[in-house]
């Protein structure tokens, strides 16, 4: 017997299947999709068996050394899926399999993660002999069935030992998982007519993709739950993705109320051991629902009956390192393989998905109203240009007035500090002006060392001038504000308010985030102040005011999606207000009150925003009209990186006539860990024209030790 093994070598040059011989003693254990140890040069490596065959073209084959898994860890579907992802991302095949598995199962990561066992004892068939009192007590207890070791130890450790030695008791090990949910108790809510209509529109026997556009508070969660219930009744399984479950505890809680221990959860806040256990529950078909973040799309569920992706617009579904896959694309592939529907929901769908729905590629489902006729909140815009003149740099008079009003009425407030901008860009502190590239309509990035502003799409550069070209003040700076600072200011103004600050610092400790959420829900605080995490999926009855402190930060990030991100964020956070009987309102502080993204948020007009933004994307040749691939060239040697990037650019220009090639330009973060990075952007219409040439480039640079080339299709950031 010969097997084809894909070995794990960190060296990027080798990404191939090698043939090995299987000795007689291993033959019965060989299966496709298990890991084995194989000799490779002078090393012993781990690898996945991907093929079983009779003969090989290679002579002098070496033999496999050992078998690692009893159970298959990559089933046939995942093996095929890995190959497809490899072709789409041009990453190494091995990385496409590694990303599917919990760390404990990745080849050669040297992580040893134990399984945990409960030990039970039961009586042997014949129990003859003389026993002392304690021994008899143990035997009597075991007459009732299997008894847990701990209970018997309590009676007498030495008697237990004796009975085991005499073969009176037989040991049984049962694996014990680290996590578990209670049995379910709650019922599904009775659906409204609108929700019912949506549920009935989904054909569970077909592989269609549905886009559920439902405003905030329209009851999408219950729709998902109902769909899953129907799927389980058909004896199939369900896979549900959420942007980051540790940040959406309310959703997981609702699911566990209904489905209890039929759920396994997979997300980054779990320990490696917990992930391993959850994964095995799935692999052994002990659960029928998986809820998880991005990588849960690879959950080894068999007999898949539905895939659901909540908050479809979230950029967390795209992985930022190799393999740079998009869970939404993977979901489409899995839905086709399993002939089951994919339902993607959002109050603010991504432009790409909404455009596909417009073309009939996806089926559009919509829930335009909140549950039980509740109104969407009134949104008021505050022009910060005016407030600055009054000396209010953080909080406008109107926002303060309304917060006081809510405190007085014993209602709650959510305040968002928009900190989307991680890149260094500059703004005018007086009027909010930001410099943009004349060619790409992209915010220019500030490069400290050269004191210049650069467009990292096309490479355009200009000197930094402290004087603002709009208001003529010397107020251009790169200063941002943090939540701590805002909290301080807020405490000065509102001495008695109980303020809870929630950002990535205060929630990084395990369990902190859900603790804070329940404290806020229990009315231990009046004001929840935080970054983007307060915008996500929270449902508090008593919140009747949402304030956005600085709407513009996300408008100014150097990214063609900045308007979309801003529209989506502000709509989402607005949606936290007035979700129960009390009417809600929203105050948005901005330097750009006339910006279309902000105007459309005010009017709750997703469709209006979509149309306007699509025109701009069309004019500037951005997605969804063009695909984008970002080529990142990096090297320790700056000149080498620059030279190779130019070479690549020339090669692309020679081979791609229809496509648009931008750059090279220094990457957003040009120098990182002493590695210099340049980027080239390709805008293209057809996969077929660019893939062969890009594939050649990737192959070529595999054997270059000095320069590294990475590709990112449909990137989140450049
Ligand atoms: P979305 O995810 O669309 O923003 P949610 O699923 O959070 O909305 O639902 C909003 C609120 O409406 C929640 O408090 C939920 O419990 C409630 N709700 C949803 N469906 C129903 C229903 N059919 N009957 C009563 N309440 C419902
Ligand atoms: Zn430019």
Image: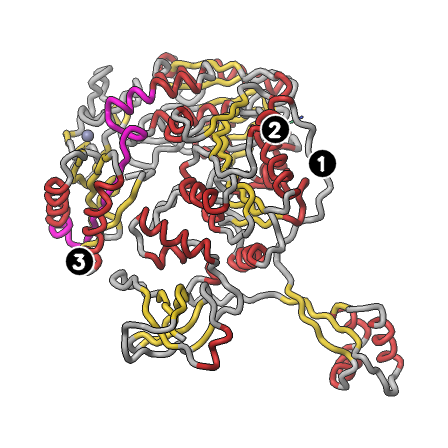
- Of pointers 1 and 2, the one earlier in the residue sequence: 1
Neighbour tally class for label 1: few under 14, some 14-19, many 20 plus, Cα within 10 Å? few
Q: CA distance from mark 3 to mark 1?
A: 60 Å
Residue that appears at 50% across and 63% down = 72
Where 472 sits versus 558, above or below? Answer: above
- Of pointers 3 and 1, the one earlier in the residue sequence: 1
Q: Which label was assigned to residue 254?
A: none
User: Quick check: can you spot residue 186?
Assistant: yes
Question: Which residue is under mark 3?
Answer: 706
Q: Mark 1 or mark 2: which is in front?
A: 1
Residue that appears at 74% across and 77% down = 170
Q: Secondary structure at mark 3?
A: loop
Where residue 442 sits, quadrant-wise, is top left
Q: Quadrant of ligand 1?
A: top right
Q: Mark 3 or mark 1: which is in front?
A: 1
Residue that appears at 44% across and 30% down = 362
Where 60 sits versus 460, above or below? Answer: below
Q: Is residue 453 left or right of residue 104?
A: left
Where residue 136 sits, quadrant-wise, is bottom right
Q: Which residues are magenta?
A: 613-642
Q: Secondary structure at mark 2?
A: loop
Name the quadrant of the C terminus. top left
Neighbour tally class for label 2: few under 14, some 14-19, many 20 plus, Cα within 10 Å? many
User: In the image, is the residue at mark 1 within 8 Å of ligand 1 by its beta carbon?
Assistant: no
Q: Which label was assigned to residue 187?
A: 1
Question: Which residue is under mark 2?
Answer: 540
């Amino acid at each position: 017997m010969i097997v084809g093994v894909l070995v794990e070598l960190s060296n990027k040059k080798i990404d191939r299947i090698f043939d090995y011989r299987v000795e007689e003693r291993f033959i019965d254990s060989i299966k496709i999709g298990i890991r084995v140890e194989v000799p490779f040069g002078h090393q012993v490596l781990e690898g996945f068996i991907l093929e079983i065959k009779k003969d090989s073209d290679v002579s002098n084959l070496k033999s496999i050394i050992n078998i690692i898994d009893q159970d298959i860890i990559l089933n046939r579907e995942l093996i095929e899926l890995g190959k497809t992802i490899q072709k789409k991302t041009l990453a190494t095949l091995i990385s496409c399999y590694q990303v599917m598995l919990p760390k404990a199962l990745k080849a050669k990561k040297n992580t040893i993660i134990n399984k945990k066992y409960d030990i039970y004892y039961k009586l042997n068939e014949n129990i003859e002999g003389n026993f002392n009192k304690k021994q008899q007590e143990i035997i009597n207890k075991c007459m009732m069935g299997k008894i847990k070791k701990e209970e018997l130890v309590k009676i007498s450790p030495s008697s237990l030992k004796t009975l085991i030695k005499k073969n009176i008791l037989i040991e049984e090990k049962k694996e014990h998982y680290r996590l578990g949910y209670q049995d379910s108790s709650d019922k599904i809510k009775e659906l409204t007519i609108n929700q019912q209509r949506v549920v009935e529109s989904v054909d569970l026997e077909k592989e269609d993709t549905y886009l559920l556009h439902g405003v905030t508070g329209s009851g999408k969660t219950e729709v998902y739950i109902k769909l899953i219930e129907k799927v389980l009744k058909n004896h199939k399984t369900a896979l549900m993705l959420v942007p980051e479950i540790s940040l959406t505890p309310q959703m997981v809680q609702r699911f566990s109320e209904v489905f209890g221990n039929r759920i396994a959860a997979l997300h980054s806040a779990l320990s490696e051991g917990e992930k391993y256990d959850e994964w095995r529950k799935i692999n052994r078909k002990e659960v029928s629902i998986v809820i998880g973040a991005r990588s849960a799309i690879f959950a080894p569920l068999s007999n898949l009956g539905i895939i659901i992706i909540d908050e479809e617009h979230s950029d967390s579904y795209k992985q930022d390192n190799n393999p740079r896959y998009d869970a939404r694309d993977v979901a489409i592939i899995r839905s086709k393989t399993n002939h089951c529907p994919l339902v993607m929901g959002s109050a603010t769908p991504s432009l790409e998905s909404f455009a596909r729905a417009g073309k009939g590629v996806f089926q559009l489902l919509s829930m335009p109203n909140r549950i039980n006729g509740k109104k969407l909140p009134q949104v008021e815009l505050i022009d910060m240009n005016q407030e600055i003149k009054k000396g209010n740099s953080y909080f406008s008079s109107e926002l303060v007035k309304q917060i006081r009003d809510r405190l007085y009425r014993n209602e709650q407030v959510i305040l968002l500090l928009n900190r989307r901008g991680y890149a260094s860009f500059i703004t005018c502190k007086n009027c909010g002006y930001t410099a943009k590239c004349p060619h790409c309509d992209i915010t220019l990035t500030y490069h400290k060392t050269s004191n210049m502003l650069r467009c990292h799409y096309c490479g355009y550069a200009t000197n930094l001038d402290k004087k603002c070209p709009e208001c003529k003040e010397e107020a251009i700076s790169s200063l941002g504000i943090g939540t701590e600072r805002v909290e301080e200011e807020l405490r000065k103004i509102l001495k008695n308010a109980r303020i809870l600050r929630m950002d990535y610092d205060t929630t990084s400790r395990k369990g902190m985030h859900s603790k804070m959420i329940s404290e806020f829900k229990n009315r231990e605080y009046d004001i929840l102040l935080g970054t983007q995490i307060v915008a996500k999926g929270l449902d508090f009855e008593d919140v009747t005011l949402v304030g956005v402190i600085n709407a513009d930060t996300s408008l100014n990030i150097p990214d063609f999606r900045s308007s979309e991100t801003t529209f989506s964020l502000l709509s989402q956070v607005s949606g936290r207000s007035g979700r129960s009987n009390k009417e809600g309102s929203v105050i948005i502080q901005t330097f750009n009150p006339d910006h279309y993204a902000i105007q459309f948020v005010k009017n709750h007009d997703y469709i209006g925003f979509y149309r306007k933004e699509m025109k701009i994307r069309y004019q500037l040749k951005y997605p969804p009209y063009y695909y984008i691939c970002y080529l990142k060239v990096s090297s320790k040697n700056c000149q080498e990186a620059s030279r190779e990037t130019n070479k690549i650019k020339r090669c692309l220009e020679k081979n791609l006539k229809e496509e648009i090639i931008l750059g090279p330009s220094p990457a957003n973060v040009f120098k990182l860990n002493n590695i210099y990075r340049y980027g080239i952007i390709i805008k293209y219409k057809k996969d077929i024209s660019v893939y062969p040439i890009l594939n050649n480039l990737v192959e070529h640079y595999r054997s270059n030790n000095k320069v590294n080339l990475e590709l990112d299709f449909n990137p989140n950031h450049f």
